[in-house]
């Protein structure tokens, strides 16, 4: 009986925001939120762009490796700020897929190095405002961070 009561309490707690107010919509998981941010940031058509299993697997693999939601968001922002990756190259081809950004740890770190934490934070704030998800659940700490703590921007 104690286990079912604990589960019920946890369920109720998940339906409350930080102020103790009831939240009517479900909070999405990190991979779902990352995918939504990527679609928005890369200006993909949300009706056509699907959260294919290979995209989910790449995100989950990086999260299991110890990279954070903030790291992946910063990498997405880094890719979106690269003219070459956005199609300004000899083939006029975009190289902006989530499977590329999250292919492996070194790719993720390379894209993270293409922007600052502060710039990624500002982009995420715009995403929150434009999509109406502001304050909905557990979002990246980078949104509220003041600087680039722990990020080596020297390019080394």
Image: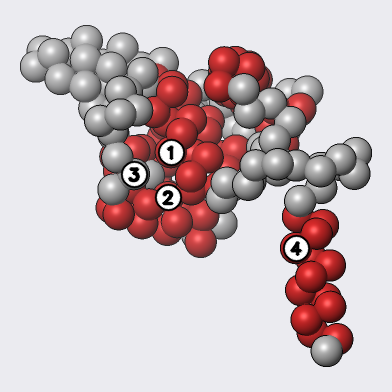
x then y, percent, for residue 7: 76, 74
Furthest-left residue in this view: 91
Q: Are marks 1 and 3 in contact (CB under 8 Å)?
A: yes
Answer few, some or many: residues within 10 Å of disc 3's Cα (few below 14, many 20 plus, some between 14 and 19).
some
Q: Is residue 61 left or right of residue 11?
A: left
x and y, in percent, of residue 2 in the image: 86, 86
- In space, the residues marked 4 and 1 are separated at their CA atoms by 25 Å
Q: Secondary structure at mark 1?
A: helix
**Front residue (pair 46, 110):** 46
Separation of residues labelled 2 and 1 (CA atoms): 9 Å
- Circle 1 residue: 35
Front position in the image: 96 or 29: 29
Type of colouring:
secondary structure
Q: Mark 2 sits on what residue?
A: 59
Residue that badge 4 annotates: 11
Q: Residue 148: horizontal and vertical position, in percent?
A: 69, 27
In the image, residue 47 above or below residue 2 = above
For residue 51, which numbered disc appears in the image? 3
Residue 34 placement (x, y as % from top left) = 49, 39
Residue at 48%, 48% (x, y): give it: 31
Of the two numbered discs 3 and 2 on the same chain, state the one appearing first in sequence: 3
Residue 97, quarter of picture = top left
Dot placed on the residue nearer the N-terminal end, 2 or 4: 4
Q: Nearer the viewer, residue 140 or 46?
A: 46
């Amino acid at each position: 009986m104690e286990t079912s009561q604990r589960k019920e309490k946890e369920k109720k707690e998940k339906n409350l925001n930080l102020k103790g107010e009831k939240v009517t919509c479900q909070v999405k998981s990190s991979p779902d939120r990352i995918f939504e941010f990527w679609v928005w940031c890369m200006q993909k058509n949300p009706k056509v762009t699907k959260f294919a299993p290979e995209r989910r697997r790449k995100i989950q693999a990086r999260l299991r490796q110890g990279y954070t939601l903030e790291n992946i968001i910063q990498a997405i922002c880094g890719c979106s700020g690269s003219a070459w990756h956005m199609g300004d190259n000899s083939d006029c081809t975009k190289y902006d897929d989530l499977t590329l950004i999250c292919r492996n740890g070194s790719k993720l770190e390379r894209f993270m190095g293409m922007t600052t934490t502060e710039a990624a934070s500002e982009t995420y704030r715009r995403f929150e405002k434009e999509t109406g998800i502001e304050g909905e659940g557990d979002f990246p700490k980078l949104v509220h961070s003041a600087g680039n703590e722990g990020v080596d921007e020297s390019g080394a």
